[in-house]
Amino acid sequence: MIRTWASRYEITPLTTIGAIADLEPRQGAIIKVQWSNGKTGYADLHPWPELGDFDLDVQLDAVSRGKLTCPAEQTIWMAKRDAILRSEKKSAFSGLSKVKNHFLITDFTKVGEAVLREIKESGFTTVKIKVGRSTEDEVKFINKVVRQSPLQIRLDFNSKSTYDKFAKFISLLSAGEKKRIEYVEDPFPWDEQGWTEAAKLAPLAVDAEATNIDWKKIKLPPFKVMVIKPARQDLDQAVERVNKFALKMVITSALDHPVGIAHASYVAGELKKIYPNVLLDCGCLTVRSYKPNEFSTKMMIQGPYLNNVPGTGVGFDDLFAKLEWQPLHV
Ligand code: MG
């Protein structure tokens, strides 16, 4: 038996998040879970109704009835990892392998020369740009990044393009610019033939579209990289697929609360130890996408690295102690 409590929060985006959300505050909850042996852990529950998740109220109701679906299932899994560390008074970050993160650009119209310089000087070597709204402006921005910095580029269309629009986009890039594109994530909705054609134009990565793939049937995936969000999918299954098809992997946050970021970073650091050459730069460090809060200011960040969150487990001990908790169990 487990007992669960929720503490609701809002986080406010600093810029529009890709093509999927606007500037309204986003709703989520920190979940506290206690197992019958007394071990207690914390994790984030941050649904994305924009991506088809049930909204927070429905998720919390499901947790209270013990009927877990993703992402709540992953929340409990992460809380358990946290609980084990807390019971041993250990920090998730002590001895953890260092993982470099990309810099996420959710709204490139806000990124000028000075910001690009700052990104480079603070140690980032890769930027991920959310695209799929205006080809011409986006291509211009890529021109600018390539001209003004040595940064590698990841593009994410969040499945918002089509094969034709995607082909047009790539055709507008010079050979030198194309070389800087490490990969393009979810260019358009999964269809094996379309993606196979698209892969001839640029290296591809799969993120949310992974759920639309028939993994039993597929022989030679047209993508080289799998983007894994431990907050939204079963980690073991994802890593098994990476190994089976000799892919590379990138762990990212779910653009969630700092507690979610800490958990994603813990997962990434553990994987780095086991798969140093398979794990690429990750995308866990998304704190800058939201207005700072009490939690984000506890994170010890150095350029592209999250070095530590003081405390036991994923950290934040004093803040968890201060939160108001609404019981979900009956
Ligand atoms: Mg993505």
Image (spheres, rainbow, N blue to C red):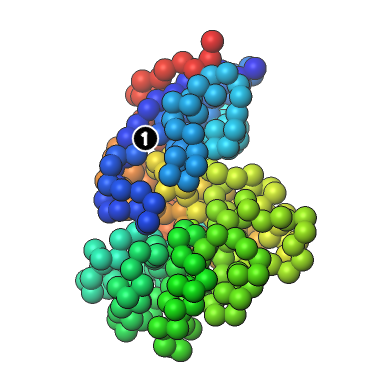
Q: Secondary structure at mark 1?
A: strand
User: Which of the image's four quarters has the N terminus?
Assistant: top right
Q: With 4 as the anchor, is 219 left or right in this view?
A: right
> Extreme bottom residue here?
175
Q: Is residue 241 above or below residue 12?
A: below
Percent across and percent down for residue 242 are 68, 60
Residue beneath the point at 66% across and 56% down: 213
Quick one: label 1, few (<14), some, or many (20+) residues within 10 Å?
A: some
Q: Is residue 172 above or below residue 94?
A: below
> Extreme top residue here?
330
Q: Is residue 304 above or below residue 71?
A: below
Q: Is residue 309 above or below residue 271?
A: above
Percent across and percent down for residue 132 are 40, 64
Residue beneath the point at 53% across and 29% down: 41
Residue beneath the point at 30% across and 65% down: 108
Percent across and percent down for residue 288 are 32, 53
Percent across and percent down for residue 24 are 28, 42
**Residue that label 1 marks:** 27
